[in-house]
Structures are given as C-alpha cells and as structure tokens.
Image (cartoon, grey):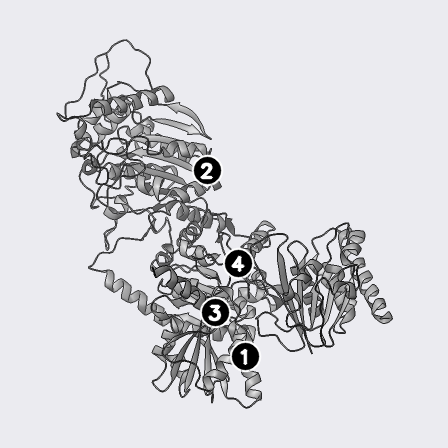
Amino acid sequence: MRRQIEGSKAVAETVARCRPAVVAAYPISPQTHIVERLSELVASADLTGCEYLMVESEFGALSACIGASAAGGRTYTATSSQGLLFMAEALPNASGLGLPIVMTLANRAIGAPINIWNDHSDALSQRDAGWLQLFASSNQEAVDLHVQAFAIAERTSLPVMVCMDGFVLTHAMEAIDVPDQDEVDAFLPAFRPRQWLDPDSPVTIGAMVGPDAFTEVKYLMARSQIEALDTVAEVAAEFGSAFGRDSGGLVRPYRTDDAEVVLVVMGSTFGSAQDVVDELRADGVRVGVLAITCYRPWPFDEVREALRGIPRAVVVNRAISVGAGSVLGRDVRLSAEPGTDVLDVVLGLGGRPVTRAALRGLLVDALAGQLPLDELYFADLDHEVIADQLDRDREEVAP
Amino acid sequence: MTTQLYQIGTYAAGNRLLDPDDRTEQSRDDRTNAITSGHRACRGCGEALAARVVLDSAMRAAGGRMVTVNATGCLEVFSTPYPESAWQVPWLHSLFGNAAAVASGVAASLRATGRDDIRVVCQAGDGGTVDIGMGCLSGMFERNDDVLFVCYDNQGYMNTGVQRSGATPPAASTATTRPVGTSVGNAFGTGKSLPLIAMAHEIPYVATATVADLHDLEAKVVKAMGMHGARYLHVLVPCPLGWGTASAETIRQARLATQCGLFPVFEAERGVVTATTAIRHRIPVEDYLRPQKRFAHLFRSDGRADVVAALQDRADRYIARFGLAEPTEPSEPIEEESS
Amino acid sequence: MSLDVRIHGRGGQGVVTAAELLSLAAFDEGLNAQALPSFGSERTGAPVVAFCRIDTAPIRAHDPISAPDVVVVQDPTLLRNGDVLLGLAENGLVVVNSAKDPADLARAGLRLRGNQRAVCLPASDLARERLGRPLPNTALIGAVVALTSVLGLPSLHAAILERFSMADDDVLAANLRLATEAHDLTLEGDRRA
C-alpha cells in the first residue's frame, strides 16, 4: 500500500511482514527508528510468532541471531557504524556457518572522530566478511530489498546486509509502497533451513577445521558467494514480476548508453544524480549514471558491460581505504576495460551532503578534462582549512 | 558399622547396591553419552568428565529434547576436530565471548517457532564465562532467558597455553603470572566470583559443584533443568596440565578444593543462598596446594609461608561466609581409599 | 510545480513534525513530498532544520534544500544567524513565528532582498491558547498552507489526523482548530496587506 511514511518505519513494517522469528538489535543512531518500530509491532501483536530480544550490545545482537538462525528461525538485526564494528567478529562467523541472517545497515561514518552522519565507511570496512551487501538507492528500493534479502539469503544460505543511507533515507518521510502481508507471503516461503539444531537429527555446527581442510572450505564459500550473483539477479526479476517494480538486482544504469562521462555511485546519491543527468541531457550533454546495487559479491561482468565504450567514469567514493586510495573506485577500475578512464572522487564523508550542484560540477569538469586522473580527489574539501592546519603543523615542527 | 567410602561417597557405593531411582545417570546403560569417546582431551581432563556428566543428566531431564551451545575453548577444540565430532547431541559453536548470547538466540528461536519443549544448555570454560563472555552472560541473566549456563572452571586459559583468567586463584603460577622477581604468581586482590555475580542478577538458580561429587553434580543439573529462566552452574574441573597435577588425581584434587574451603559448594535461588554442602573432613589449604605444580613456588626452600597463610585466611573466610564448617560428630574412622 | 520549504527552529519546537505535516498534506492531495530533517544527537534547545520538498513529479534527490521557496522560522532568535535566509528564492516567502511586524524584525536579522516577503504570525501565542503549550508548528504550517496556493486546509487537517493519531481526541481537535485559526488569520492578514 502506498503511504507517506518515514523510511525506517517502512523498512520495519516490511521486515515484520517477512515474519522473522527472532529480532535481536541494539539501538544506534541512525537505525533507532527501525528497531523501535519493530518492538512496537511485536508488543502490539501486529507481528506474532516473533521474539524481540533486548540485547546488551551489537555483539550480543548478531550472536543471538546466529543462535536463532542455527535453531531454525528466520532472524533479523540492524545496526550502523560502530555497532557493525562491534559485531565484526561475529560477521564472518555468520557467513562461515552459512546462516541466512538479514541485517539492515543504516550507513554511517566510522570514528574516530565520532560522527553519526552518513557515508559508506561502515559497510565497506566489512566487505570481506562474507556477507552479501546490497545498496538501496531510494527508500522504495530499501523496502523492496529487504523482502528480496530474505529470499536471497535463504536460497544461498548466506547472510545479507541491506545498506541504506543513514538519516538521508532512514529519516526521510516520503511516498513508499509498503508491501502487504499477502504479497510478501506469496513471495517469501517459510524458512526451510539446510541444517538446524534438531534433537531428532543432531549435527555439530562450528567444528574446528585444520590446515588439511580449511582451504577447501574457504574455496567453496567463495564459490557460493560468486554464484550468489545469479541469485541476486533472479530474485530481483521474480520480485519485478510479483510486485511490478524494478528494484534490486546487480547494477542500475541510467542514460549511460552513449554517455561520454558516467558517474558511478552507490546509495541515495543515485536519485540526485538522475536529476543532474536529466538536466544536462536536456542541454544536449551526453552523461549518465551507474548505480551499483549489489556491492558484494562484486558484479564484475555487469560493471564491465555497463562501462563498455564509455570514455570516462567518475566514481563517487563515500569511503576511502586510508593510505591506499579508494575502495569502490578500485573495484570499478578492475572491472572497466582499458579504454575507460576511471576517476576517483571523494564526496560526502561524515554526512557532508552530496548536492546536485556538486555532482553537476563533477560531470562538467570531467567532460572538460579538468578532473585529476590517478589521484584520490576530495571534491568537497575546504582547502583553506587544510592549508591553515598544515601551516600550523609546520610551525610546530620548526624550532 | 558401615564402611564409608570417601572417594566416591557413601551413597554411590557401586551403584548396583542402590535403589535404581538413586543411581547416577552415568551408571545407566542407556545414558546419552553426549560427548562420546574419541575426543582429544588430555588424560585426566576434568572438563571432559564434567561435560559428559552434565549433558547426560540434562538430556535425561529434558527427555532427550535439548541443544547445546559451546564457547571456544578446550572442550570445543578437543571435541570437534573436523571431520570428526564427539558430540551426539545438537551442538553449536560460534565464538569465544558470545556463547550466552547465542544460547539466548537459540532459546528465543525455539520459543518463537513453538518448539520450546527443546531445552538449551550453554557451556563455556572460565575464560569464556568470566572474562570475554561476561557482557553477553550478564545480558542473558538480566533478560532471564531460558538457558542453563554451565561454566567449567579450570581457573585459566588452558587451551591457549595456561594463561591467567579472571578465575585464576591468587598465587597461582600461570604463563602470564609467573612467580619471578617479587611476584608470588597471580596477584592477590584480583579475580571475580561468577557465582556471586550470578546471584547479584537474582536469577532463578545458581549452584557450584565439582567433579568430585558425581551425585551432587547430577542432582544440581536435574534441579536446574526442572526450572525455567536463567540458571547458572559453576563446576570446578581440575586441569592436570595447567595445575601440574597427576592425571589420575583429578577427582581427588577437586575434593581437596572443597574440603579445604577454597571452593565452596552451595546453591542459591534469586540471590539468596539456599543450601550449602558442609565440609566433611576439613584439611588445611596446604594439603590442597602442595600436589599442584602451579603452587610449587610456595613450598620451595625460599617458599612463601606468608602466602600460604593468606590463602588459608581466604579459605577461613569462605568457610565462615558460607557456613561450611561441619558440626562435630562422634568420631568414626574414615577409610581413605588407597590410590 | 515544485515547492521547497525549509523550516528552522530549536529542538523541542516540533520542527521535524512541521515538515512531516506538510509532506502528509501534500500526499493527501496526490502530490509527491519528501520531508527530511537535518539531524543531530537528541538535544532540546539546539538549532534544528528540516526540509520539505513538494512536487508534482516524483522526487528522486535526497540532498538538502539549498534554494527554498519558503523559509519558516519557528524561533525568531535564530534570525540573528544569517544562515536562516540563505538561498531563499528571489521571490521567496518567510513565515516567522512572532507577534511583531516584519519591519520590526529587520533589526533582529530579518533582512529581505529583491521580491522576498515576510509574514509574521504569533504562532506560539495561538498555540498556548489552543493547546495549552507554546508549540508553534501546527499554526505555522497552517500559515504556509494559506500563503502558498499548493495545498488546501482539508489536506492539512488530514495530515494532522494521521500524524497525531495516537493523541487524545481533544488534543487532535485542538490542533485542527489551531491550524484553521492560523490559516484563516493569515489569509485575512494577507488580504489586508
């Protein structure tokens, strides 16, 4: 049903309709409205057959989900930033044990310095934890991705993280079509675990694997992650047929076909970029934008395909690999063919807004060859502040 | 005059002489044998013994409907060398510090899906309980989740090479508390009592036990399984390797710990002590400490009588606090079983 | 048609709710609307900004409104800070919660340029009368509805009923009355001006 509703609440209601057996989450800005709404739905018995655990930390939250999932229940948690880091030890534990847990990650910067606002450093810091990472470009897609996430997770037996920009999407109130219970029931079957803690058929989960077998176990895990690319695409297609909406999938190109410059983005930047692309196209400027929806596993082929023949790709990085450059940009560079210049731009760290004016500026500058190549370019940096601080540092060092 | 068998307790005499209802679970042919033979524990491992006793009793009490969550540690490592497993019950190992949270999640999942006839037993060593597991454990207690948490306390991080934990007793030599220089081993004034912390949460049931008293341990498990909510069982399990004791002496060492007063045996419900096991035959702490290499530095020529006295003082305080002193009885010769 | 509204106030004055009410009213009229708070840690008294963009076309962008058509100032003490009117359109509208006249507020920081105009409404006073609390947001949104020709009062009423559905009936009724009163007062004042 189409409603004017806050993103967080829409996600919470959608998750509730996916009939989780256990919700275990610890509050952290900007995820709080999601878990608050879920606790309301459980308390009011709108959501039945669900236990809401008031855990003592994020580490406890994901750990409880691990137990709940292994015991055969559909499970859900949500967190951001520091909370994700606090459960970091449990992330690869969940993926390694093949548990189809679904988590909402309300993207937020990682400290120090402490910062509660939106960027992608939390998600990208855990890109190797073995979780699928899907980025919502809008609140509608966020809602839709949660339904798809449970399906993907349970088919692949891998945990899935649905990323949505903290505050920017979570706290935005807009028109969202929240799936009805019948629609979700028709799409999402009951959870049938591959294995679970069953007294009638005891299994040992979590054995110690030595050098003689570890490599094979890891190889098979990596393989199943890559095969998950197909599942992500399939589920998105099925969702499209069932709900009549194009949501999810691997990548989302917009007017890239004959573009001279394509912005590559993740998350809510996509919507702003679409506006800018339309404006410039109306002036006859050939630009486009490519959103990466499925960040892990990385859709190598789809990105390559989308950027084929594009002279210049400008990657909007909302996280960096300190001391080593970009994260998203590098993944794109590896996928693009040699004929495409991939430029790394940093924008919107720690909640600094990614404005349409800034995006427009990037496209125009890229077209004019005025964006630096081979450099991590901080496009919204206050150079005066930097110059002042560097001067101060130099003075302190000089005798 | 009945002969009292000190080693295994009067009432356990061969089991076959007992009324079937009074026999131990371990004496039954049809016990689960939750952890079966073939595991890689050291000989004389107190934890392997305790785990079998505890889980077999728990399975009996739960009518076979039980799942086990296990923290990282000796027990997990020696029981699941892939591709083998010694577990004959549903068993889940996640991480070191999260066993209690994982168990909470299991219990919640079973309840949500209408299968809460299946009971949850969580087990961890002292490290995974009192140190790294503390946050999650306190959370489980605070929520009163329906989990029986069993701590097998061998008083150190044994699997990683005998390092000191928050359960290591004062003056013990470990890999990180060697008695060198002026150090006496593990420092006095440190350490925590998880049974007392558990009691502070006012959970339905807290009990301590050891591998020296089989009946007592089983009875406490059965009692705990007869309740719902958060329950805690703290079992002293000597570690021959870490304590430097003979592998055939594990059960005796556990008894000496209780008889000198350093390990009080008691039960509590909702924060109040409800029963204590009186010391049957009190011994000085020295009798308990001497056979353990981890205390050998106290008894050398340059030994530390003052430290031994401090430990005696500690034992005296426990005895007073928990009322462990036995009222005087007409003397009866107690026949000690020869080793 | 698009209308970008930026609302300034202090924590505890219902700034975010104001933006939400506008967005709900727009939804009720079949328009697209996005209400977006600028956020910080919870703290009463601190300056707070919220945005509401209304459009006939679907709204894709989620960046802050940099060129508002309407600026609502729920706390006139914020006028001292020049940022409140930053980016206001050439013919933009400022609605200020104040019993004073716009001319009197010029000294307090209400500096208009071009064809910008300001309207004052004693929203806190009205709210104190109707609600028993000086919570100015409902009244100010009533004024915005009156001054822009995009939304109607019935939609604002629908928005109030939806947003405050958990409140007591008399609180709901009081808010509806307040919105109407502020709306009508503003229209009347505008006609006279």
Question: What amino acid is found at the position of numbered circle 3 in the picture?
Answer: Glu
Q: Secondary structure at mark 3?
A: helix
Which residue was labeled with disc 2?
B228
The tag earlier along the polypeptide, 3 or 1, is: 1
C69 above or below A79?
below
Spatial CA span between label 4 and label 2 = 36 Å
Q: Is residue A102 visible?
A: yes
Spatial CA span between label 2 and label 3 = 64 Å
Give the number of the disc on residue A384: 3
Is residue A74 or residue C152 the one in the foreground? C152
Spatial CA span between label 3 and label 1 = 31 Å
Q: Secondary structure at mark 2?
A: loop
Which residue was labeled with disc 1?
A274
Labels 4 and 3 share a subunit: yes
Spatial CA span between label 1 and label 2 = 57 Å
* Residue B28, horizontal then vertical, whole percent: 28, 35
Is residue B92 or residue A91 the one in the foreground? A91
The tag earlier along the polypeptide, 1 or 4, is: 4
Spatial CA span between label 1 and label 4 = 25 Å
Q: Are marks 3 and 1 in contact (CB under 8 Å)?
A: no
Viewer-nearest of discs 4 and 3: 3
